[in-house]
Structure formats: structure tokens, C-alpha cells
Image (cartoon, rainbow, N blue to C red):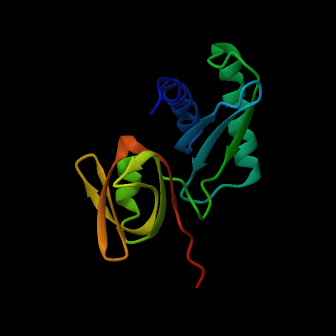
Amino acid sequence: MSSKLEQLQALLAPVVEALGYVCWGVEYISQGRHSLLRVYIDHPNGILVEDCEKVSRQVSGVLDVEDPITNEYTLEVSSPGMDRPLFTLEQFAAHVGEQVKVKLRSPFEGRRNFQGLLRGVEDQDVVVQVDEHEYLLPIEMIDKANVVPRFE
């Protein structure tokens, strides 16, 4: 995780949690003059648009005062959804047995993209089974990971 992302997570998670929500994760996508800050929130009862609005107002106020992002950006507050992104080892552990898509920052064993069964977490590695092969993917190498939704 980049230091900017760690700074944003440390700043925003307490704000989200003080409102009674879980701060599922934070994404910061720097795109020159028009960057995107996305804050994922969750709650046992689900997330409604009103919840996102409430959190957005509070987070926006904190960002205005603290000013951690110097360039223009768009703030989005969202639920993780069915294809929920996975940010932490704890989140990976909670979704063992599900299909996941994982994209790495740099190639590992010759590839950057993996889709398969999430088998578990070992130390700082995420275990993903693709066909008949198990890969131990270091958490610090993961750029993006999502649960693949099942429609039954």
C-alpha cells in the first residue's frame, strides 16, 4: 500500500466508523489533474444511497480541513457490492472458498492476472488455486482483488 493510501485510510477510517459503518477500503487513483478517491463502506444491514450521502458529507468535510490531496479529485462513497474488492488479509480470510480475481503490480511466476478459488491465507500470502495449481501471492504484490459474484 502506498504511503498516500495509508495516510488516506488512517484519516478516513475513523470518520466512517464514527458514523456506525465499516470502512471496507479506500482506493486512490491518481489520473493527473482529475484523480479519484473512492471510499467503500459496509454495514451488517446493507448500504443505501442515503448512507453513502451521509458518509460523503462527513468525509468531504474532513478532507477540506486536512487537505491531504493537493490536486483536483472526485470523491465517491460506495458499498463494496457483490464483486467486493478485497484489501486486507482479514478480508481474504473471510472469503475463503469463493472465486476471486487478483491482479498483481508486477508479474509473479510469469503472470499478473489470476482467477480461481480462494483457498486461504498463509502468513502474508493469499492462496489462490487456478485449475490444478496453487499460487501463494504476497499481499504486498496485489494491486487489485475482487470476489467473483455467483448467480444461482
Q: Is residue 62 above or below residue 81?
A: above
Spot the residue most to the bottom.
152
Report x, y in % for residue 39.
Answer: 62, 40
Residue displayed at 68% across by 38% down: 55
Identify whether 37 is placed above or below 143.
Answer: above
- Image x and y of residue 80, in percent: 60, 54
The front one of 76 and 122 is 122
Q: Classify residue 16 as left or right of residue 106.
A: right
Which residue is located at x 47 percent, y 64 percent? 100
Check the picture and name the quadrant holding the N terminus.
top left
Left or right: 31, with 8 as reference point: right
At x 55% / y 34%, what residue is drawn?
A: 18
Residue that lies at the very extreme toward the left in this rendered image? 123
Residue 115, image x, y percentages: 46, 66
| Image-quadrant location for residue 133 | bottom left
> Considering the image in quadrants, where does the C terminus appear?
bottom right
Q: Does residue 108 appear left or right of residue 45 in this picture? A: left
Question: Residue 54: image x %, image y %?
Answer: 72, 39
What is the total number of numbered labels drawn onto the structure image?
0
Quadrant in which residue 52 is drawn: top right
State the residue in front, 73 or 41: 73
As displayed, is residue 102 above or below residue 70? below
| Left or right side of 137 for 44 | right
Picture quadrant where residue 140 is located? top left
Nearer-the-camera pick, 129 or 39: 129
Q: Residue at x 76, y 51 (%)?
A: 49
* Residue furthest to the front: 110
